[in-house]
Amino acid sequence: MKLQKLTPEAVDGKVVVVRTDYNVPLKNGVVVETTRIEESIPTLKFLLENGAKKIHILTHVGRPGGEVVPELSTKQILPSLEKFLGAAVEFRPDYSSGTERVQLHENCRFYPGEKKNDPLLAEEIFKNLHPDIFVLDGFGVAHRGQASVIGLADKVPCYPGFLLEKEIEALSPFLSQEKIPGLTILTGGVKMETKIPVLMHFARTAENILIGGALANTFQVAKGFGIGASLYEEEFVETAREVLAEAEKHRTGVHLPIDVVCADDLESTEAIDVPLEDVSGDMKIFDIGPHTVASFSEILMHSRNIIWNGPLGVIEKKPFAQGTYRMLEVIRKCKSTKTILGGGDTLKALKKWNVAPSEFSHVSTGGGAMLEFLAGDTLPGIEILKSERAGK
Ligand code: 3PG
């Protein structure tokens, strides 16, 4: 995938609008997970060091739905951004231009026109900020055809930031339509909908797919197993069967938990490990069991490439966090394996157990964007960078 390069000449003396993805977890107004902010720094520093006249940073936090929601103000990002950038950043409550060289604007999703990519909003941004170029560095939003992502594309030259480039480079080898030797996908979490296309893709090209979390429950039902009163998605049982059939056709192993950690509810301190066939009645599955951990570990240790997205259990609750923790420990030890991690919940797991992203080949800042990219979908944010005007 060939995109224009952000060069010193493209930046020198220019007013730059940068779309980053600072959709980060916040607690009492403080950023608790900073990976996305830290990963945006190389591009911002490049702009500063190469003479950009003004840098306007646009980002969203959460899904305010076109309304002003003070708890989702980007102002809360400011201290972390200034700390990592090592420069003063001015907060702008709207799309007006201030005086500092670097300015962070209020949540772009406070505007009703953002989500639907209203041309009037893009025009307003353009008229207020007078950008000479646009840089997309928020890989996490590259799958959103929204005003702050693609709205300036027909007005000014567009470039990818270094984070976007890095993500594309790390993930592109897995777009292959051929079987990828030694590729294992480890996945979990809850939502089938976001994972189906990527599961379908890897049902053809991976060697093994290991599934945990509530996602696994839907597959267990598809295979005819009982899961007691556990969470699953009835409307996706048929789709799960299609994924299983596709995997069988391509000789891809799909591995589901053989034992699980169950309790009556999430607050329960009495968790029991049982073989899957013993799950019945009111029992609810909240984690993978130790035998599953052992068999998943064995497969991971013999893999050449690992892609991991989504926790295997409810990591916020101690009795149900072990499965995810053990998988993380195994992947950390796979030093000669290419290890790709992604998704907000996976980043949360790294933070929870104090594991540095640098221990892996690549930790993607994209959640949905990573899944859509790996499924081979067209991402609007990347498309604009390929279009004729990009970089012109
Ligand atoms: C993410 O967290 O995956 C990105 O910031 C995109 O957020 P969205 O799903 O609300 O568009």
Image: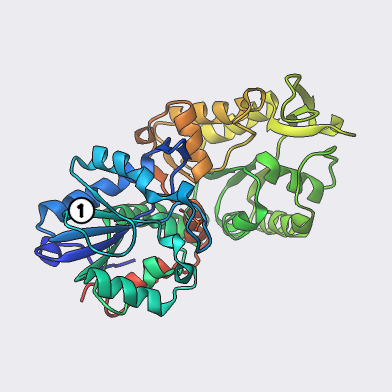
Disc 1 crowd rating (10 Å Cα; few below 14, some 14-19, many 20+) is: many
Placement of 333 over or under 211, stated as above or below: above
Nearest the viewer among 392 and 111 is 111
Q: What residue is disc 1 on?
A: 102
Q: Is residue 40 visible?
A: yes
Nearest the viewer among 122 and 33 is 122
The C terminus - image quarter = bottom left
Count the numbered circles shown. Answer: 1
Q: Residue at x 45, y 61 (%)?
A: 109
Q: Residue at x 42, y 47 (%)?
A: 364
Q: Amino acid at mark 1?
A: Val
Percent position (x, y) of residue 369?
A: 47, 57
Q: Residue at x 53, y 61 (%)?
A: 65
Left or right of 312, for residue 373: left
Q: Residue furthest right?
A: 281
Q: Secondary structure at mark 1?
A: strand
Left or right of 195, for residue 69: left
Percent position (x, y) of residue 197?
A: 60, 60
The N terminus - image quarter = bottom left
Q: Is residue 258 visible?
A: no
Left or right of 87, for residue 196: right
Placement of 130 over or under 244, stated as above or below: below
Percent position (x, y) of residue 168?
A: 36, 57
Q: Residue at x 59, y 43 (%)?
A: 187
Percent position (x, y) of residue 26?
A: 46, 40
